[in-house]
Image: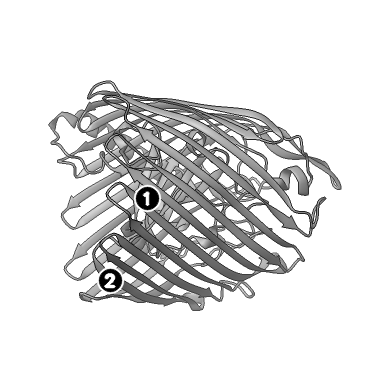
Amino acid sequence: MFQYKKAAFLLFISLFAFTTINSQNILKDSVQLGEIVVTGSKKEISRKIIPLSVTQITNQNIENSGQMNILTALNQFSPGIFVTERNIVGFGVSTGGSGAISMRGISSSPNNEVLVLIDGHPQYQGLFGHPLADAYVSSGVEKVEIIHGPASILYGSNAMAGVINIITKKQKNEGFSSTLGNSYGSYNTQKYYGTFGYKNKGFNAFASANYSHTDGIRENTDFNIGNGYLKLGYEINEHLSVTVDADLAKYMGNDNGKINAPAPFNIDILRGKAALSIDNKYNRTEGSFKIFHNFGNHNLSDGFISSDFNSGIMLYQTLKLFKGNLLTVGTDIKKYGGMANRGIHKDTLLSVTETGVYLYSQQQLNKYWTLTAGLRAEFHPKISPELVPMAGVNYNVNENSTLKASISKGFRNPTIMEMYLYSPNPNLQPERMMNYEIGWMQALMNHKLFTDLTLFYLNGNNLIQTTGVFPNLQRVNTGTLQNYGLEVSVKYAVVKNLFVHANYSYLHTSRKILAAPAHQLNLSANYRYKIWNANASVQQINGLTTAMNSDITQNYTLLNLRVTAKPMKFLEVYVMANNLLNQQYQINDGYPMPGINFNGGIKIII
């Protein structure tokens, strides 16, 4: 196995070297190198002048992967990310829950080191500060943009390890469109969904509805979720537009506990959100004003009942002051909290208001050099103001080669749970981290091949950990970390109808960390021929720690295959086989993952 990983690693390095040597023979207009992204700067901008490591994943990528949930598709197309799973559908919450996101080895329990956004709005539970992974279904997604490494300069707390921005669909073409689909597979796993879009001049609307069910891979591990989403937009004129959207998700699930220690447990959760965005765009300035509100009710079979909220206002404006300059000025106010029938302050409404202001400037000196710098000031009622600097540089060697480097600070404010509920300490300070990285992006072979290499080193301190002996436990700022590693991504259009995507990540950590494999290799190939489309994917995981009290790590190889046929313009039919090598493995300790399993379905396009 080690030789296999070593060979794969050498293959990536050789490919990178080859692209560098041959870069002078490449033509113009690299689509990949010039990808337009918004998450790394708040404004739509080319990756070539963003010093941060950014990945963009399209809706077609997610659909080809065959995944029902967005998060499980991310690592197939983005290096350095790992998401824990425990069932064929359903991440769950509390003890045994999965859906934890690790980025460059930064993760925690609950998972509040990686910030999840929907259309730029933060999504996390108001008391515990973590995202709710089960709510992120794939049918309403246009694309996903990921910042690897700290993005606290733009997004504040919880963006310490990185950001995942889920950008939702909107109707682009005049008139009406719709899709209806369903699937059925192993373990009585079912999914039904529909999307509906309409556009007439300045008005556009998009709606989606989803329902998923599985009996689960073990007795008493069934899961159900229903989700509805609505997005309405209106272009007032060529400069101003308004968008409102709302989402509601209801999910219920059972968890039978670890296989060697069954302990039945069930959840009943309602999550919702609503947002208003007013966007402006002129020749020399553009920006946005956003209001958002997220809420949730959790009812767990162990007697835990809670309600929570996360609301806020975000305002930013980007100015073109002079040639080559972009200056973004922004502020955000977030109020989050809730109440629970457990903890030191049970049945008490608790809330915290955080305020941030920031400046973020980019200056293109010439066609080669771009400098970026920014500073954020974050204010918390119980904590001294936090200053968050960031600086970076991009050097475009030519139109096909870009060298970039950055230094950025990440931080995470303590949650309400940590300060006031369980083993509380109201005097906790933010967790902090400095990230140093250097990267190279390269296009070649007439832009059929694109490579992206990043080397990083990060140093964290003040990490919140629990000390003492039960029942005298308390959280304190005592933890440290030093991680370094390598991330490589390769995209290759082999021939007109064959596209290959591969990524590899190596991670070294100074201490044992859950859900952070030392080596991760993902390879997918998509081939289209007439009415047929075939997608094969391989994931190789080595050195995955699933339990802190064990020195045993998980090593496994997953092989999936999905074949789609489109016999008519309005009809798609697919079949999919997962874990074709029938690997026996666990991601959450005590929760075996499914062996070989199948599903199939249809999609009607109107």
For mark 2, what is the residue? Answer: 176
The three-letter amino acid code for the residue at tag 1 is: Phe
Q: Position of residue 54 (x, y in %)?
A: 38, 40
The residue under the point 23% across, 60% down is 527
Q: Is residue 235 left or right of residue 174?
A: right
Estimate the spatial distance between the alpha carbons at disc 1 and disc 2, rounded to whole Å. Answer: 31 Å
Image quadrant containing the C terminus: bottom left
The residue under the point 26% across, 39% down is 33
The residue under the point 34% across, 58% down is 234
Q: Position of residue 282 (x, y in %)?
A: 29, 40
Q: Earlier in the sequence, mark 1 or mark 2?
A: 1
Q: Position of residue 22 (x, y in %)?
A: 18, 31
Q: How many numbered badges does the structure rendering display?
A: 2
| Residue 76 against residue 287 in the figure, above or below | below
**Residue 587 seen anywhere in this rendered image of the structure:** no
Circle nearer the viewer, 1 or 2: 2
For mark 1, what is the residue? Answer: 77
Q: Is residue 38 left or right of residue 479?
A: left
Front residue of this view, candidates 170 and 403: 170
**Residue 577 seen anywhere in this rendered image of the structure:** yes
**Occupied quadrant, residue 401:** top left
Give the class, few, some or many, for how many residues have Cα within 10 Å of label 2's Cα (few <14, many ≥20).
Answer: some
**Occupied quadrant, residue 559:** bottom left
